[in-house]
Image (tube, grey):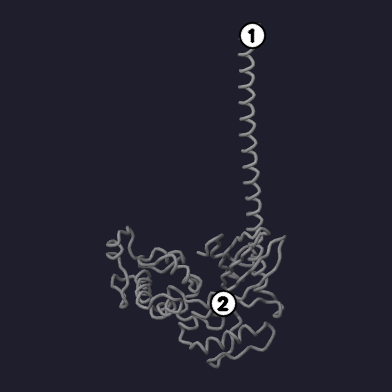
């Protein structure tokens, strides 16, 4: 074999070695990427299951026969460890919220005002909520929005003219932005049909929107925080006693923190007891991972 032929053969071998090295590098990179993705998926799945364990524990504690072990559904945090995850669970009785289909526009406006929404805008949005749920085509007194207003804003849909069926519908309202939606949604419900919330388990903005003074609201919250199941019921500022029976429908937020600090949230609305079917402890009315609604 001539020197030129040997040189060409050597170059060919070198090129083949380079090509094989490149293929091996690409394969190794792909394998590493898939391994990292698989690890992340496993960790996320473990955190989601830990958060769902918080939902299940909340359901059990809400119907706990021993009053001293029963959880109070007023939004106070309950914390525990689960398989290297730190879990925090908050349970809120739906009766302590304002029902979007039953509460009048004035109280909804007051609620948004106490949440920090500018008063004129709060009144207007409360009117938009009223026009969304009522069957007529008349604008609310506070200035709502009917089909023509949605059309003028370039929206293909108009006012629903029917009751809210999900809290997510709030995001479709004319004038509703993400910040206001996130402020409002923890304090409203579609599951009670009550014109006024039950104050016993309500949060501060709801209490203030119901007309309690800051001092009365603070007193109620302090009494409730100090009370524990099994103790005598405290007397509220209006002379009534704390309602502890609960409505049977609860919103539960469960947050699981992984060892690396990553947070996974599961939000559920549960209806407890009879009617859940198949011997289940509860019927899930809503279930969402991530954003609440």
Residue at point 34%, 60% (across, down): 157
Q: Looking at the picture, how far across and down is residue 87, in whole percent? A: 66, 66
Quarter of the image for residue 131 reads bottom left
User: Image height check: is 24 above or below 259?
Assistant: above
* Marker count (numbered): 2
Q: Looking at the picture, how far across and down is residue 132, in whole percent? A: 36, 69
Q: Residue at label 1?
A: 3
User: Image height check: is 282 above or below 197?
Assistant: above
Residue at point 38%, 71% (across, down): 129
Q: Looking at the picture, how far across and down is residue 197, in whole percent? A: 49, 80
As drawn, which residue projects farthest toward the top? 1
Q: Residue at label 2?
A: 247
Nearer to me, 95 or 46: 46
Tag 1's secondary structure?
A: helix
Query: Which of the labelled discs sits on residue 181, or is there none?
Result: none
Q: Local crowd at mark 1 within 10 Å, few (<14), some, or many (≥20)?
A: few
Between disc 2 and disc 1, the foreground one is 1
Q: Quarter of the image containing the N terminus?
A: top right
Tag 2's secondary structure?
A: loop
User: Gap between marks 2 and 1, in whole Å?
Assistant: 94 Å
Quarter of the image for residue 163 reads bottom left
Nearer to me, 113 or 275: 113
As drawn, which residue projects farthest toward the bottom? 239
Q: Earlier in the sequence, mark 2 or mark 1?
A: 1
Q: Is residue 84 left or right of residue 194?
A: right
Q: Is residue 100 left or right of residue 80?
A: left
User: Image height check: is 192 above or below 227?
Assistant: above
Q: Looking at the picture, how far across and down is residue 248, in whole percent? A: 58, 74
Residue at point 65%, 43% (across, down): 35
């Amino acid at each position: 074999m001539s020197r030129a032929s040997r040189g060409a053969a050597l170059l060919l071998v070198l090129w083949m070695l380079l090509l094989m090295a490149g293929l091996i590098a690409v394969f190794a990179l792909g394998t590493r990427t898939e391994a990292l993705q698989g690890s992340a998926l496993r960790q996320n799945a473990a955190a989601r299951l830990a958060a769902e364990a918080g939902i299940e524990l909340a359901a059990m504690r809400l119907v706990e026969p021993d009053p001293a072990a029963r959880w109070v559904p007023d939004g106070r945090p309950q914390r525990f460890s689960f398989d290297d995850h730190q879990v925090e669970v908050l349970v809120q009785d739906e009766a302590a919220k304002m029902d979007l289909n039953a509460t009048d526009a004035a109280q909804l406006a007051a609620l948004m005002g106490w949440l920090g929404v500018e008063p004129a805008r709060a009144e207007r949005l409360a009117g938009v909520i009223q026009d969304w749920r009522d069957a007529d085509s008349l604008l609310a007194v506070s200035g709502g929005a009917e089909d023509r207003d949605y059309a003028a804003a370039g929206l293909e849909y108009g006012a629903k003219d029917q009751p809210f069926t999900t809290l997510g519908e709030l995001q479709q309202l004319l004038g509703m932005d993400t910040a206001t939606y996130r402020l409002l949604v923890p304090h409203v419900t579609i599951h009670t049909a009550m014109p006024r919330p039950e104050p016993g388990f309500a949060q501060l903005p709801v209490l203030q929107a119901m007309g309690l003074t800051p001092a009365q609201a603070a007193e109620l919250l302090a009494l409730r925080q100090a009370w524990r199941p099994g103790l005598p019921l405290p007397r509220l500022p209006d002379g009534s006693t704390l309602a502890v029976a609960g409505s049977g429908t609860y919103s539960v937020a469960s947050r699981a923190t992984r060892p690396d600090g990553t947070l996974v949230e599961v939000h559920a609305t549960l209806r407890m007891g009879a009617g859940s079917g198949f011997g289940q402890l509860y019927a899930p009315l809503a279930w969402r991972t991530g954003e609440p609604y």
